[in-house]
């Protein structure tokens, strides 16, 4: 009797590598589409080096470029505890329902259920509960029509922890894709930061269709994997939405054997979540905790544009599933040698 061998997932430690401190981008490229672009060809095991605006050369008429149009809101904001001078940093994670928010607070030990936090301009909140992840549930009260103008004006961009500086007003523009429209993320879909309006027009003019999905990226994107066995890691759930129009365009392209090119890992998660029988997707919305790691057979995505991610991160696992672990690690070493910049404000790659 013959038994087929089942490929086992790699162990977390197999993704260990050192990224030099000077290669971690602290600021974006001066011009979005002038950053470096590495072309990974897994079939031929080759690496090429271009500029991001050359990405159009790897797309053909009829292909579909899929982007995540989530919008980052300036989630880090400061308040004071009522009846004290204690300053509290509030990191707004997501709105649970009208005026009810999940948030992280710092210093957490000083913020307890029953406390009131004062933000100014007639805006305050009551701490009504704790969360299992160490956060707080806040109920806001205010005299204005909406809290969002206050957040937009006074909040700071929630830069990732590996960017070792305070966020500035400029980050509100830089840490946002040019096509962001659906508010809800505390982290940017960073692969999309390289696209400019001018480049998108050129791509469209070439006959490539541009469509959007929405996935609101949470703080879990930075949460490290704590288990050696990848099958035991639990992803945070994130909200997604795919319109029936987007689904129809993608399905039609698939039927014609055109390429579906995903901009970023959040777009991949969304598309692979909503893939139904065969190679079709459906317009829908919901929550996904899908964790993609090797071995994985991609059902919808043919090509991936992404950044250079933190070693041992869930993002790196997904990208390695799209090529191979060894080829990806080789590309990372080549990127270090060629002085590519890494992570959110860093350079890009396309896996063709």
Image (cartoon, helix red, strand yellow):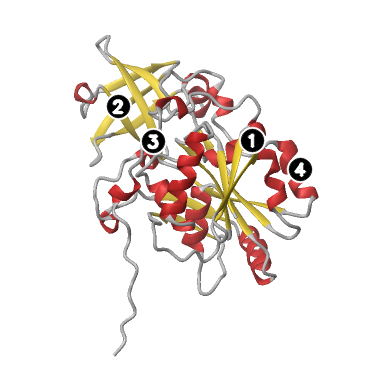
Residue where numbered disc 4 is placed:
201
Residue 34: give x, y in percent of width and height.
Answer: 66, 32
Of mark 3 and mark 1, the one earlier in the sequence is 3
- The tag on residue 105 is 2
Evaluate if marks 3 and 4 touch, with contact meaning CB atoms under 8 Å apart.
no
Calculate the distance from the C-alpha at mark 3 to the C-alpha at mark 1: 22 Å
Which of pointers 3 and 4 indicates the residue nearer the eye? Answer: 4
Q: Quadrant of residue 44?
A: bottom right
Q: Earlier in the sequence, mark 3 or mark 2?
A: 3
Q: Badge 2, how many Cα within 10 Å: few under 14, some, many 20+?
A: many
Residue at the extreme top of the image, as rendered = 85
> In this view of the protein, which residue sits in the foreground, 276 or 10?
10
First-in-chain label (3 vs 4) = 3
SS state under label 1: loop
Give the x, y percent position of residue 304: 56, 52
> Is 337 positioned to the left or the right of 302 in the image?
left
Quickly name the residue at label 3.
93
- Characterize the local packing of mark 4: few (<14), some (14-19) or many (20 or more) Cα atoms within 10 angstroms: few
Q: Residue, x 65% and y 64% (percent of image)?
A: 248
Q: Is residue 138 left or right of residue 151?
A: left
Q: Which residue carries the number 1 mark? A: 178
| Residue 21 percent location from the top left of the image | 40, 26
- Nearest the camera: 175 or 287? 175
Residue 28 sits in quarter? top right
Helix, strand or loop at label 2? It is strand
Q: Secondary structure at mark 3?
A: strand
SS for tag 4?
helix
Disc 2 or disc 1, which is closer to the eye?
A: 1
Mark 1 neighbour class, 10 Å CA radius: few under 14, some 14 to 19, many 20 or more: some
Q: Exactly how many numbered labels are in the figure? A: 4
Query: Disc 4 or 2, which lies upstream in sequence?
Result: 2
């Amino acid at each position: 009797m013959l038994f087929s061998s089942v490929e086992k997932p790699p162990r977390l430690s197999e993704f260990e590598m050192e990224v030099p401190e000077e290669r971690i981008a602290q600021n974006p490229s001066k011009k979005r589409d002038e950053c470096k672009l590495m072309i990974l060809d897994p079939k031929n095991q080759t690496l090429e080096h271009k500029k991001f605006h050359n990405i159009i050369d790897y797309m053909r008429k009829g292909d579909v470029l899929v982007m995540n149009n989530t919008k980052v809101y300036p989630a880090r904001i400061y308040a004071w505890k009522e009846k004290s001078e204690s300053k509290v940093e509030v990191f707004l994670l997501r709105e649970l329902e009208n005026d009810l928010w999940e948030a992280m607070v710092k210093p957490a030990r000083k913020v307890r259920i029953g406390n009131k936090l004062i933000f100014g301009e007639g805006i305050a909140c009551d701490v009504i509960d704790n969360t299992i992840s160490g956060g707080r549930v806040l109920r806001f009260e205010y005299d204005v029509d909406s809290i969002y103008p206050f957040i937009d004006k006074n909040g700071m961009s929630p830069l990732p922890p590996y960017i070792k500086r305070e966020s500035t007003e400029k980050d509100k523009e830089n840490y946002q894709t040019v096509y962001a429209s659906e508010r809800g993320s505390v982290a940017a879909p960073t692969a999309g930061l390289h696209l400019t309006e001018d480049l998108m027009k050129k791509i469209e003019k070439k006959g490539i269709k541009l469509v959007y999905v929405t996935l609101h990226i949470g703080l879990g994107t930075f949460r490290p994997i704590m288990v050696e066995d990848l099958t035991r890691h639990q992803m945070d759930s994130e909200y997604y939405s795919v319109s029936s129009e987007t689904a129809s365009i993608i399905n039609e392209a698939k039927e014609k054997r055109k390429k579906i090119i995903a901009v970023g890992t959040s777009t991949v998660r969304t598309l692979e979540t909503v893939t139904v029988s065969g190679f079709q997707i459906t317009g829908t919305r919901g929550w996904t905790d899908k964790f993609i790691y090797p071995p994985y057979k991609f059902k919808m995505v043919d090509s991936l544009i992404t950044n250079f991610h933190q070693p041992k991160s869930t993002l790196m696992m997904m990208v390695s599933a799209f090529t191979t672990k060894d080829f990806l690690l080789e590309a990372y070493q080549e990127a270090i040698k060629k002085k590519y910049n890494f992570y959110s404000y860093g350079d890009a790659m396309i896996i063709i």
